[in-house]
């Protein structure tokens, strides 16, 4: 049997808005995926460590406090530094259009803003995650 | 429906805390604002005041709320983002430059570091020559909901409650015009709970605070009139109006029957309202003006004492000056043009509103009983009960939206392809490094001997039961920073780490 997709849902920085992250975590679990949720207040270092330890296929980053450029950029740098390949990174939260383009350039595959459905996120992951 | 004759201004105040309500005095229009540096925030405050806003509401950035200076490595990317960055008295002086503190009332959304920010405010009053007896405002100072929904806790519950009681006790003596706790349901509602849960969880937090202060030996009527509340106003118009009425009725009974309050002011539930950020959509953002108008009207018909109306662009970024002004104008139109201020509780007596009020009261009582049965709110929070209830409700809401059982205009129905782009408020990315340089200079310039002495006194006091407020005021006067004070408190009190998972 194929292993289910394993996803780390991570809250970066000091932001405490976790409704979106939790709802996505619960939704992806109900869609048959294995989900690990970090809880709030994680440094980029902690997020990357958790991704390595849990051996996930995908990382979903959430931020609603405006710290996403600094924090997500650092996560992507660390993933590169640790030579982690094949882990899909996606994001959600309050992220202005201008930053979406920049984040995609950094290698974040998709940004799911407010109003996104869990169904669309699950479908995106099923289509794009490389199974290990 | 029970047969009762309730009147505005009379116990149990379901119909409003004043007999005349807005005929006597309009609500305070208080727009939550603050971003970037102290200088930028000062400019926005002066602008809002010049446009007819009647009170200030201070938003702090997350490092300030969680006790890190702008130059701390934990502050990476967060400096000046969701509010203004305040690390020392120098920043606070700049925010209120040219704003006399005896002429405005200021509400501060601050919890774990409330005692420090209040100390900074009082130190600014001193510098302006304004006596503390003439200073008025509010600190949110409501840590319990932070463990449940908002997440800006630092210390474990017990020392956090001590800090809260220190503020209550200190202000009762020294700053009589200060509202010492604003018990908030807003964030739990934003996190996904229902209207009945919002009432119950908020009042349960309120009960825990009153209990803490009573256990310290304070007379309930000496501090309870200074406790205020902060509710959300969601999009279900009639339910929200009934919610405010039910909450007032319940609180009046709790204060009289459970705590034996004698002063009617202790029984009056006074509250600030903010329209619901979570009902705003990034799609078709102009629709948000309409949503906010409906929500604001419900808050007014529900008898709010002060109001924040959200700006249309808040699902996308912080509001621009233009959209912040439109949000304020929305309130002004309700206040001056709509005519709803003519009569207190104009919907009282409507069959539907009265029965909805009774229903919500009963449902909220049910939750309050459950919480009492597990040993009170602190236990209910620590056991994860409240957290799970809220996120279960949030998930149910999301599923209903995805199945189109709930319609959100522009999101799952009446979707338009045309993308409207809004101009958004930007935070200067250079301000974070600039703040680091400024703080380094401040640490050089201040009197190191005095700083060391204050910090030493604070360190010793944290291990006694002494009231920390006067000591913290001494620290901030000598330019000890928010981060440095919190470092001392963290060392003695420890840090809270949540244990519940999904």
Image (cartoon, coloured by chain):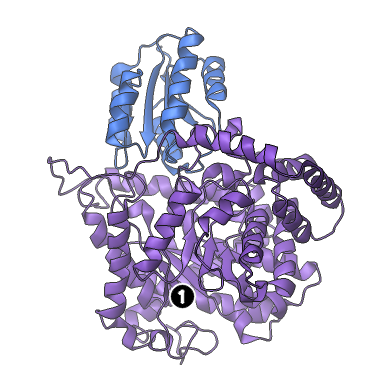
Q: Position of residue B77 (x, y in %)?
A: 48, 33
Q: Residue at x 40, y 10 (%)?
A: A86
The shade of chain B is purple
Q: Is residue B491 left or right of residue B316?
A: right
Give the answer, above or below, for where B327 lies relative to A35: below
Return the chain for callout 1: B
Mark 1 lies on a secondary structure that is loop
Q: How many dots with numbers?
A: 1
In x, y percent, where is residue B92? 57, 54
What percent of the width, then of the height, locates residue B223? 69, 75
| Residue B429, percent from left and from top | 42, 34
User: Colour in which chain A is shown?
Assistant: blue
Image quarter of the N terminus of chain A: top left
> Which of B118/B286 is in front?
B118
Foreground of the two, B46 or B159 = B46
Q: Quarter of the image holding residue B489?
A: top right
Seen in the picture, residue B403 relative to A76 is either above or below; the reply is: below
Q: Which residue is mark 1?
A: B305
């Amino acid at each position: 049997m194929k292993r289910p997709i394993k996803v780390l849902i991570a809250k970066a920085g000091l932001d405490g808005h976790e409704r979106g992250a939790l709802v996505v975590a619960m939704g992806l679990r109900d869609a048959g995926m294995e989900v690990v949720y970090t809880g709030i207040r994680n440094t980029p270092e902690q997020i990357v460590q958790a991704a390595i330890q849990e051996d996930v296929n995908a990382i979903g980053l959430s931020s609603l406090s405006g710290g996403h450029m600094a924090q997500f950029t650092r996560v992507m740098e660390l993933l590169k530094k640790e030579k982690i390949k094949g882990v899909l990174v996606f994001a959600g939260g309050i992220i202005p259009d201008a930053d979406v383009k920049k984040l995609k350039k950094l290698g974040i595959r998709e940004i799911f803003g407010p109003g996104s459905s869990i169904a669309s996120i699950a479908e995106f992951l099923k289509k794009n995650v490389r199974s290990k | 429906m029970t047969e009762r004759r309730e009147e505005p201004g009379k116990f149990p105040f379901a119909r409003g805390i004043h007999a005349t309500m807005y005929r006597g005095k309009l609500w305070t229009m208080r727009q939550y604002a603050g971003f970037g540096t102290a200088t930028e925030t000062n400019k926005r405050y002066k602008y809002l005041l010049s446009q007819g806003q009647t009170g200030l509401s201070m938003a702090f950035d997350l490092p300030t709320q969680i006790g890190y200076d702008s130059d701390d490595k934990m502050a990476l990317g967060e400096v000046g983002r969701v509010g203004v960055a305040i690390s020392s008295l120098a920043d606070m002086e700049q925010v209120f430059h040219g704003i006399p503190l005896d002429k405005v009332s200021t509400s501060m959304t601050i919890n774990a570091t409330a005692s420090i920010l209040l100390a900074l405010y009082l130190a600014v009053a001193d510098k302006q020559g304004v006596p503390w007896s003439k200073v008025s405002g509010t600190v949110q100072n409501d840590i319990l909901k932070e463990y449940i929904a908002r997440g800006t806790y630092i210390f474990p519950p017990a020392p956090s409650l001590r800090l809260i009681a220190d503020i209550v006790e200190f202000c009762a003596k020294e700053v009589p015009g200060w509202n010492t706790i604003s018990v908030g349901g807003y964030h739990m509602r934003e996190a996904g709970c229902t209207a009945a849960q919002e009432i119950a969880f908020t009042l349960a937090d309120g009960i825990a605070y009153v209990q803490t202060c009573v256990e310290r030996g304070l007379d309930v009527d000496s501090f309870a009139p200074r406790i205020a509340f902060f509710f959300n106003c969601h999009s279900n118009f009639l339910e929200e109006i009934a919610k405010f009425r039910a909450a007032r009725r319940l609180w009046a009974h709790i204060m009289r029957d459970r705590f034996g309050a004698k002063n009617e002011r202790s029984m009056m539930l006074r509250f600030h309202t903010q329209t619901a950020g979570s009902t705003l959509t990034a799609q078709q953002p102009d629709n948000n003006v309409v949503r906010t108008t409906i929500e604001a009207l419900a808050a007014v018909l529900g008898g709010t004492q002060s109001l924040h109306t959200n700006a249309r662009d808040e699902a996308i970024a912080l509001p621009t000056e233009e959209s912040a002004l439109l949000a304020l104008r929305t309130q002004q139109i309700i206040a001056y043009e709509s005519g709803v201020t003519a009569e207190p509780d104009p919907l009282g007596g409507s069959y539907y509103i009265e029965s909805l009020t009774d229903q919500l009261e009963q449902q909220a009582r049910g939750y309050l009983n459950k919480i009492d049965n597990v040993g009170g709110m602190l236990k209910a929070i620590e056991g994860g009960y409240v957290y799970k209830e809220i996120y279960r409700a949030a998930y149910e809401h999301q599923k209903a939206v995805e199945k189109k059982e709930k319609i959100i205009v522009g999101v799952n129905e009446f979707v338009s392809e045309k993308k409207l782009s809004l101009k958004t408020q930007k935070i200067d990315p250079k301000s974070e490094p600039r703040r680091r340089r400024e703080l380094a200079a401040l640490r050089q310039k201040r009197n190191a001997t005095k700083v060391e002495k204050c910090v030493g006194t604070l360190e010793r006091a944290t291990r006694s039961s002494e009231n920390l407020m006067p000591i913290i005021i001494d620290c901030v006067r000598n330019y000890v920073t928010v981060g440095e004070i919190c470092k001392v408190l963290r060392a003695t009190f420890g840090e809270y780490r949540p244990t519940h998972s999904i």
